[in-house]
Structures are given as C-alpha cells and as structure tokens.
Amino acid sequence: MGFRDVMYEKYKEILESYMKDQDEKALYLSQKFSRKSIEYKISPEEIISLHRTALAEMGAESLGSVMPSFDILLEVMMSYGLAYREHQSLRTIQQELKSEIEVAANMQQTLLGTQIPDVDCLEIGALSVPARQMSGDYYHFVQDEQGAVSVAIADVIGKGIPAALCMSMIKYSMDSLPEGRQEPSLVLESLNRVVEQNVDPTMFITMFYGMYDTNSHVFHYASAGHEPGFFYNHEIEDFEEIYARGLLLGIDKKTKYRQYEKKVEVGDIILLMSDGVTECRTKDGFVEVDTLKEYIKKYIHLGAQEIVNKVYKELEYLQDFQLRDDFTLIIIKRIK
C-alpha cells in the first residue's frame, strides 16, 4: 500500500466516524490530518479528491447523508489554511536567518583572512573547513622583517555566531600587539588578559602559537590548552608529539605560559591542527591518530599544501563527507 493510499484510508476513517456520530473527536483528528497533509506535501486539490472518492465508496446517495461530510471537509481545509500560513511564515523566517548567517559567514572569512607567508626555506600549507557555515577554528600567520614566521591556531569550544565573534576579537587583538613582541609565551599572556576581560565565562578558547626563526631554524612555541601538534623527523622517518602545556585562554588573567623550542632540519615537518582533525568521527568511532600519521607518510613526498589537501580528502571520505567538527590543518615543511 502506497503512502497516498494510507492517507486516503485515514481520511475515509475520519469521515466515516464523523458522519456516524458527528462528535468532536473526528473534528480533532481532521485537524491533525491537515498538518500531516502539509508535512507530506498533499495539495488541497488532492484532499478534495480524497473526499469525493470516500463519499462515493461509502455510498452516500442522498443530500441529507452527504451534508455532514462537508463539516469534516471544511474543518480540514480551515486547519490546512492556518497550518499552511504558519508553515510559510516559518519558512520565511528560516530563509531570512539563513541569509543573515551567509552574510556573517562571508564577513568572517573576510575579517579573519590571512596570507600564507612566502619563505625560501619553507613550504607552508593550510586548510580550514567549517563543519557548519560559521567556524569556531582560526589560524593566522605573521611574517616580520627579522626573518621570523609566526603562526597561531585557535579553537573556540562552541560553534556558530558567538564563536565567530570571539575569533574576530582574537584576530584584532593579535593585530594590535606591539611590533617585535612575537615571543609565543608573551603573545598568549597578552591574549589571555583580553579574553579574560571580554569573553563570557562559559566560552573557552584554546590556542597554539609558534614562531619559526628562518635564520636559526628553531621553532619556538607555547600552548594554551590546544590540541598537541606533531613533529615529523625526516632523518628517522617518524613522528613525535609537539609537547606543550598551558591553561586555556580566559581562565586566569595572571596565567604565565611556558615557551618551548625545537630545532628543525631539512625535510622535517611541523603539523598543527584543531581537534576536528584528531577527533574525526566515523560510524565505528574516532579515527586513530596512527591513521592520521599513515596518511601524512603516504603523501610526505608532496608539497605542504598538497599534503594538507590530500589528508583532508582522506579524512572527509572516512566520515562519509560529513564533518562533525571544524577542521583546521597546518603543515610547515623545511625544504632547505
């Protein structure tokens, strides 16, 4: 029995009940039938056709026996009209909200946009894909005149417009930092004070900040509770975690952050990411970190941006092309 056959039998049942007893229960059921009709896109014309067919099958021959049936038809069509207008109103509101979110998402991309530095000794690849229209992830590059490339990657624990507003505040706070004050620990301490004073206590922000000295090839870094990155050692062809500990931004304005450093040789790779990379979820559970490392090794011979793109495609496939969380991956590869 098809769907419309089921709806017809339901309508006939309601109509027969009312013509027999003419009680309030049948009228109430007719109102519910109207809403179901809109939900399943049954037109008013189809409802009238259902009514006529039901009458014919019931053998209603005299005008007296037919007249009560129009009480049901009238109730159904009145409820249908009210439900339809309500449905259209909700669709209009939804469309307006969708348009506003699209505008906000475009503004976010413009406001938070950053340029990947062009450095002779490095290849840099970056990709950030929101799970929804608005992203709670953020990354930013700064290149100074002393030959240093700084990189920030942050994640607001939350999504939507509030997260996007937080990221905009973080970005402009970073832009307002004094020239030359790019030591990762000091940057995090400055941002921590801004977040503590301006962000709702229910929102949490993690951040990793690193500075690559292109003269000494030393990577200085600090973390505010952010997802650990990985360092690929080209000589031994293996990974190690980029260890860094620190309190999330905004918890305590007096927090001090420890700074670490790592010597980078030719062929070595620095991998920074949000938890949307390491916590990719499939129907069978989370993707193992070893799986991520295997993908990196699989494409290690490619350029940094190609590695990022290929790894994203692999993880996207594992998730049936449905991201559950914002995805941000950055690769810094020393080439000479």
Image (spheres, helix red, strand yellow):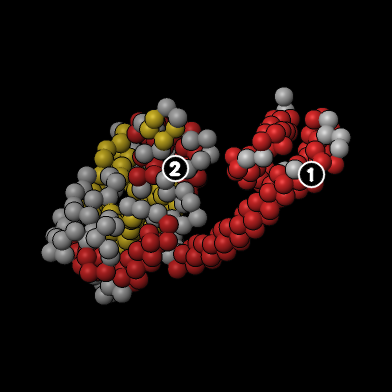
Alpha carbons under labels 1 and 2: distance apart: 56 Å
Q: Measuring from the top left, give residue 111's x and y in whole percent.
A: 45, 68
Where does the N terminus fall, quadrant-wise? Answer: top right
Q: Residues within 10 Å of mark 2 (few under 14, many from 20)?
A: some
Q: Secondary structure beneath disc 1?
A: loop
Q: Residue at x 39, y 42 (%)?
A: 277
Instruction: From the viewer's side, name the closer residue of 29 and 306.
Output: 29
Upstream in the sequence, badge 1 or badge 2? 1
Q: Which residue is mark 2?
A: 324
Q: Residue at x 68, y 49 (%)?
A: 75
Q: Residue at x 36, y 39 (%)?
A: 279
Which mark is in front, 1 or 2?
A: 1
For the residue marked with disc 1, what is the amino acid? Met
Residue furthest front as drawn: 64
For the residue marked with disc 2, what is the amino acid? Arg
Residue furthest top as drawn: 1
Q: Which residue is mark 1?
A: 67
Q: Measuring from the top left, give residue 18's x and y in whole percent.
A: 68, 38
Residue 313 visible here: no
Q: Secondary structure beneath disc 2?
A: loop
Q: Residue at x 72, y 37 (%)?
A: 19
Q: Measuring from the top left, give residue 116's x and y in whole percent.
A: 44, 60
Q: Measuring from the top left, give residue 33's x and y in whole percent.
A: 64, 41
Question: Is 322 situated left or right of 2 in this image?
Answer: left
